[in-house]
Image (cartoon, helix red, strand yellow):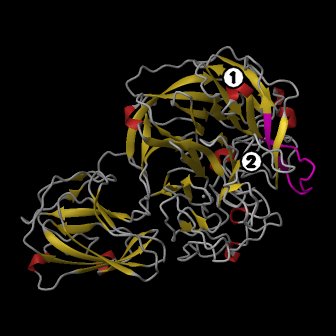
Amino acid sequence: MIMTKGTNGETSIPSGRPSRRRFLAATAAGVTGLAGVGSITGARAQSQPETIRLGGETTGWVGRKPSGIQGTTNPTLELDVGTTYRLTWKNVDGAQHNVALLDGEDAVIERTQYMSDEGQTQTLEFTATEAMDEYVCQAHLNSMRGDIKLSSESGTSETTTESSEPEGFFPTGPTVRTDTVVDGGLTAPLGLEAPPGERDAFFVVDQIGVIRRYGADGSGGDIFLDVRDQLIDFDNLPEIKTIDERGLLGLAFHPNFADNRKFYVHFSAKSRPGTPGNYTHTQVIAEFEANEDVTGAVADSQRTVLEIPSPYYTHNGGAIVFGPDDYLYIGIGNGGGALKSSKQPDDWYDANLGGNGQDVTENLMGSVLRIDVDGRDGDKAYGIPDDNPLVGDEGLDEHYAWGFRNPWRIGFSDGKLMAADVGQRRYEEVNVVRKGGNYGWNVREGGHCFVATQGSDPYRANCPTKTPPNVRGGEPLIDPVIEYPHTYETNGVGVAVIGGYIYQNATIPALRNKYVFGDYSKDGTPRGSLFAATPVEGDSWSVEEISIGNDENGELGAYLLCVARDNDGELYALTTDNLGVEGETGAVHRLRPPEAEERSTVTTETPARPATATATPEPTPTPTATATATPTETTNESDTARTGESGGIVSGDGPGFGILAGLAAIGLGVARLLGGDDR
């Protein structure tokens, strides 16, 4: 970026606002050169304009000239109010970028269009006003943003002082309270669902293999479905497999449940006929019929709908949901394993040695699938929607979108399909999923080039932003709408993203029309997080961290496993307090407005289970996430493609759900933090 400045007679002085990253205190001060900009304030007295040169790349705006900012990422720019600037920036990495000037509320004052050709330059001419607060690339709001420091014609300027704002990558946002409606009787609650129209009960999916039915107040807890006898044997695993993301992973009630009483579950079964001998299990979508009072499944009503052989014990995805079109959408991870292992097919991107995300011909992994459970297509136990994107083209017809690592929780909000995709090494992401979209894994990790080979340059500047012309015509690799790093300034941000929903109720006004999602843990301890993002068409979404008002630290104080929604549109946080501690510590918390009285409705009607692991007959798999504390692979951080839609990652076989699965050993529940190795 090159910025030159001159003067004109125009001055515009609207009121300024604090930066969203730090509080700016306006104080009278002598005009001094800002270290990050090279002392250019007061340039009116100069006969020649000062020049600022920055390189635009996905890791940030990097200072090049003058020497005071050389090598500095996102240096603060000091501007004179009323001065006209000619800003020219150069695209360094070939990713899709633009430059925008924002006010204190993130509203765009000036902006350029996106461009993606490496070496291309772009110019923006503007007059500095007191409303200007930050400069950003709108495609990479989390990494390419710097502050603007303003000085007036009188020679005074704003100085930056640190406030008591908590350290963190995201600014602190709305406050909510949590109302615990179920506490006890659950091990790893991964989902909460209810039949269409049902408001007096909800059903909780426990990864160990059971679904329990609760009243709206959390009473009850009787088993509605038990598939433990069909799951893989968690206790018969090689010692190396101390994490496991398999189990009962998803539940969806048929849109016409009131008439047909059909519901569907997604679970990890023992290997079935057709599953290769060196694979660990078979992912199964099965149909059941509920009895008339919806207290359990009709005996012998199970029908297998879909079987997917799975090579490893991680990256299973698991969420299933019916869309507005009444088709069933299925989130499937890439199956885990090293890149490349003998169980991973070749694909078009040789640099990363293959992987299921970019292959749509060999298997159904690394994708969001769409099927018609009411239809039949040949010998299949389901139908294929005619408008699925690969119908009539090369590839398996079940695919709806691909390029995912491990989509952990998918769901519809206002007709949009949202998918959170767990990261491999450095970044977590959330995507708006469109039909036929390619979300980049394993070419890209979110908006960054991904490097699979150990010892390779983690800052590779260039990688494809689309497939080759001979691969479906050169489809773009779509960036996420939300992306965040695992750490920021040595502090943990998150390890495994948890998908959620756009909240549209009036109960919690501060969350209205915001996408509420979360992360399993900030740093591997019981510190799950909730976030609120503001949807913006065609751009990255701004994100704030939600504060929990009835916790002394403002946190959940537990590992977050799921953000759920009931038929009234209210949201829930499903947690477990102490993975690795004896006993069942799963809980369900309803989100409430901060002014509501704190309540804790603890379920007491669920029969207590034995407290010790040795006395508990059920397996206790680790929640479906992946630990990334000790990376064994390197990642790229410097490239991204932007198409206005969405785009995935923790490591190789790093459990696909982030650290979630990485904190409990199978069976005994011994707490440990695992690196995301590729086994």
Q: Does the magenta stretch include residue 270?
A: yes
Q: How crowded is mark 2: few (under 14 residues within 10 Å), some or many (20 or more)?
A: many
> Which residue is nearer to you in this view: 207 or 481?
481
- Badge 2 is on which residue? 243
Q: In which quarter of the image is residue 613?
A: top right
- Badge 1 is on which residue? 213
- Local secondary structure at mark 2: loop
Give coordinates of residue 642: x percent, y percent: 49, 66
Kind of residue indicated by mark 2:
Ile
Give the label, 1 or 2, closer to the camera. Answer: 1
Q: In which quarter of the image is the C terminus?
A: bottom right
Which region of the structure is painted magenta? 267-287
Is residue 174 depicted above or below 86 in this figure? above
Kind of residue indicated by mark 1:
Arg
Q: Is residue 100 magenta?
A: no
* 533 on left or right of 74: right
- Local secondary structure at mark 1: strand
Give coordinates of residue 223: x percent, y percent: 75, 22
Q: Residue at x 52, y 71 (%)?
A: 639
